[in-house]
Image (tube, rainbow, N blue to C red):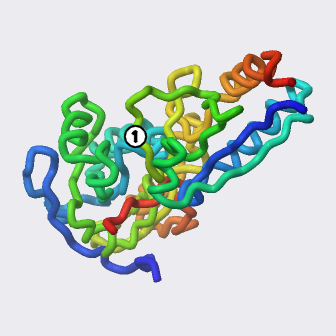
């Protein structure tokens, strides 16, 4: 059973539908539509702190962030800031970065155990 | 009930990042652009350069641009006055960046998200509110909706549409 991708989101930020669409497109591009995608809503500051949630959307496999943030990033209910490969700011990960991260993590043997 | 198109926008005077009190009405601009924005929101950051370009491009046409940060900095430290001043010091803003510490202005203007733009005519009446353009991710759009609204005001026309849906981060209200 392949490892699943967890998409953590806060409903106060409008970016998670785009992030989910990008995630499903990346998995399709990699031929990995077998990978389970789960959505987890984070709705309080306490939940954000407990889950180490630094903003919406956050994508994890096995609890590990696909786009590792700086260590000092504070938790909280906010939109997460990503940078595109060309340096532009974005509310969602760069599609190519997301695809590469998925390919890298899903290719590890333990992720297909 | 949002601030109605055609209504006179609520007046204010807010400090800029140097503490200078900056009123909504100063002189006799042909139009005024008010942008509720902030430091921490990816939508505000994505649209930021386009909005500064509008401010610069229309300055010579007697259009005044004021940008306001109303977020609760106690919960979102990246929106602190010091962080605002750092961005101004770095040359990130083409005009005053005002601090709405009490959030009174955002409440009176019924701003909901960052970034959200408002265009006033020469009489201070609201002519347009909403998004700068259709897509935060497409710089080529160049804040076309905002530019079109300002052009309409300068030509004594009513912007159409006068309202669009602003997409961005919710304003972070105090608890």
Label 1 chain ID: A
What residue lies at 19% left-to-right and 31% top-to-bottom? B89
Q: Nearer the viewer, residue A20 or B104?
A: A20
Mark yes or no: residue A27 visible.
yes
Instruction: Using residue B162 as the reference point, say whether residue B175 is left or right of it.
Output: left
B143 above or below A63?
Answer: below
Badge 1 density bin: few <14, some 14–19, many ≥20, Cα 10 Å: some
Q: Tally the numbered discs.
A: 1
Q: Secondary structure at mark 1?
A: loop
Q: Residue at x 27, y 52 (%)?
A: B73
- Seen from the viewer's position, the closer of residues B148 and B41 is B41
**Which part of the image, by quadrant, shows the C terminus of chain B?**
bottom left
Give left or right: position of A68 versus B96: right
Q: From the viewer's side, name the closer residue of B172 and A62.
A: A62
The image shows residue B74 at horizontal and vertical percentages of 26, 54
Q: Quadrant of residue B70?
A: bottom left
The residue pinned by badge 1 equals A74
Residue A97 locus on image (x, y percent): 66, 23
Say which residue appears at 19% left-offset and 46% top-offset.
B81
Toward which corner of the image does residue A10 lie, by quadrant?
bottom right
Residue B68 seen in this snapshot: no
* Residue A72 coordinates in the image, percent (x, y): 38, 31
Residue B114: x and y in percent read: 43, 54
């Amino acid at each position: 059973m392949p490892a699943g991708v967890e998409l953590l989101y806060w409903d106060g930020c409008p970016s998670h539908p785009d992030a989910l669409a990008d995630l499903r497109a990346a998995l399709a591009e990699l031929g990995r539509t077998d990978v389970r995608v789960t959505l987890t809503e984070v709705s309080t500051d306490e939940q954000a702190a407990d889950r180490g949630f630094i903003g919406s959307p956050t994508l994890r496999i096995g609890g590990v962030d696909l786009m590792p943030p700086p260590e000092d990033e504070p938790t909280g209910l906010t939109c997460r800031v990503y940078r595109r490969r060309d340096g532009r700011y974005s509310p969602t990960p760069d599609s190519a970065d997301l695809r590469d991260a998925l390919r890298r993590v899903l290719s590890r043997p333990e992720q297909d155990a | 009930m949002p601030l109605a198109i055609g209504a006179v926008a609520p007046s204010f005077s807010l400090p800029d990042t140097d503490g200078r009190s900056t009123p909504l009405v100063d002189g006799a601009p042909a139009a005024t652009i008010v942008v509720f924005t902030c430091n921490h929101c990816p939508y505000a950051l994505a649209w930021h350069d386009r909005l500064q370009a509008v401010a610069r491009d229309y300055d010579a046409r007697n259009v005044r641009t004021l940008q306001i940060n109303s977020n609760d900095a106690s919960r979102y430290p990246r929106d602190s006055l010091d962080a605002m001043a750092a961005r101004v010091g770095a040359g990130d803003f083409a005009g005053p960046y005002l601090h709405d510490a009490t959030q009174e202005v955002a409440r009176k203007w019924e701003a909901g998200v960052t970034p959200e733009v408002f265009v006033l005519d020469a009489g201070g009446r609201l002519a347009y509110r909403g998004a700068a353009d259709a897509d935060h991710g497409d710089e080529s759009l160049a804040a076309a909706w905002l530019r079109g609204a300002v052009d309409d005001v300068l030509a004594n026309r009513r912007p159409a549409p006068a309202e669009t849906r602003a997409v961005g981060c919710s304003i972070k209200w105090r608890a």
